């Protein structure tokens, strides 16, 4: 997943055009791979499944231009908070998947901060 994020900035041979596809594939893989883990409890598995599906939907929304607006940013908001909760309270269980949590949290924060309705609300406030 980290390599696909880096690909967004690599313009050599047009590799940045394929970065969203790679990120979408790897986010689904990273979300459903822990389902076979014996250490994970049901809440960990549900969160990883939720985060991967919402993250994948956000990537697909950015690839496919649809004529109406879907505000997936609201579905991404809980990801950083739940990631922090898991990192804080069950480090031994999620320590080898903290990188995935960090990437999903960063995606959620960036999507929320750069969404059109956030810009509109901030422009009305300030």
Image (tube, grey):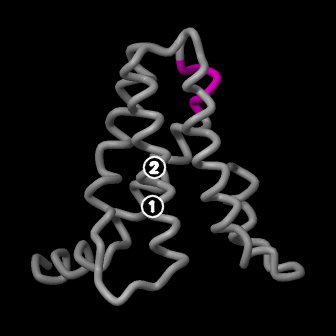
The residue carrying pointer 1 sits among few (fewer than 14), some (14 to 19) or many (20 or more) residues within 10 Å by Cα, namely: some
| Magenta region, main secondary structure | helix
Magenta run includes residue 96: yes
Which residues lie in the magenta part? 94-98
Residue at the bottom extreme? Answer: 67
Relative placement, left or right, of 21 versus 53 is: right
For the C terminus, the image quarter is bottom left
**Relative to the observer, which residue lies in front, 36 or 79?**
36
Q: Quadrant of residue 79?
A: top left
Q: Is residue 122 above or below residue 21?
A: below
Q: Is residue 67 above or below residue 4?
A: below
Q: Quadrant of residue 123?
A: bottom left
Residue at the front extreme? Answer: 36
The residue carrying pointer 2 sits among few (fewer than 14), some (14 to 19) or many (20 or more) residues within 10 Å by Cα, namely: some
Say which residue appears at 67% left-offset and 66% top-offset: 21
Say which residue appears at 51% left-offset and 57% top-offset: 56
Mark 2: which secondary structure? helix
Q: Position of residue 81 (x, y in %)?
A: 32, 37
Q: Is residue 70 above or below residue 72?
A: below
Magenta run includes residue 88: no
CB contact under 8 Å: marks 2 and 1: yes
Q: Which residue is mark 1?
A: 57
* Res 6 label: none
Q: Which residue is mark 2?
A: 53
Q: Across the whole image, how many numbered discs are drawn on residues?
A: 2
Q: CA distance from mark 2 to mark 1?
A: 6 Å
**Relative to the observer, which residue lies in front, 106 or 24?**
24
Residue at the right extreme? Answer: 13
Say which residue appears at 61% left-offset and 36% top-offset: 99
**Relative to the observer, which residue lies in front, 64 or 113?**
64
Mark 1: which secondary structure? helix
Q: Position of residue 50 (x, y in %)?
A: 40, 41
């Amino acid at each position: 997943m980290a390599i696909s994020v880096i690909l967004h900035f690599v313009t050599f041979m047009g590799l940045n055009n394929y970065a969203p596809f790679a990120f979408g594939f790897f986010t689904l893989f990273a979300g459903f791979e822990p389902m076979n883990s014996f250490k994970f409890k049901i809440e960990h598995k549900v969160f990883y499944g939720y985060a991967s599906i919402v993250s994948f939907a956000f990537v697909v929304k950015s690839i496919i231009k649809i004529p109406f607006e879907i505000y997936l940013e609201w579905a991404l908001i809980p990801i950083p908070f739940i990631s922090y909760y898991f990192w804080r309270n069950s480090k031994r269980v999620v320590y080898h998947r903290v990188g995935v949590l960090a990437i999903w949290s960063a995606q959620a924060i960036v999507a929320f901060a750069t969404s059109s309705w956030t810009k509109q609300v901030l422009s009305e406030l300030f």
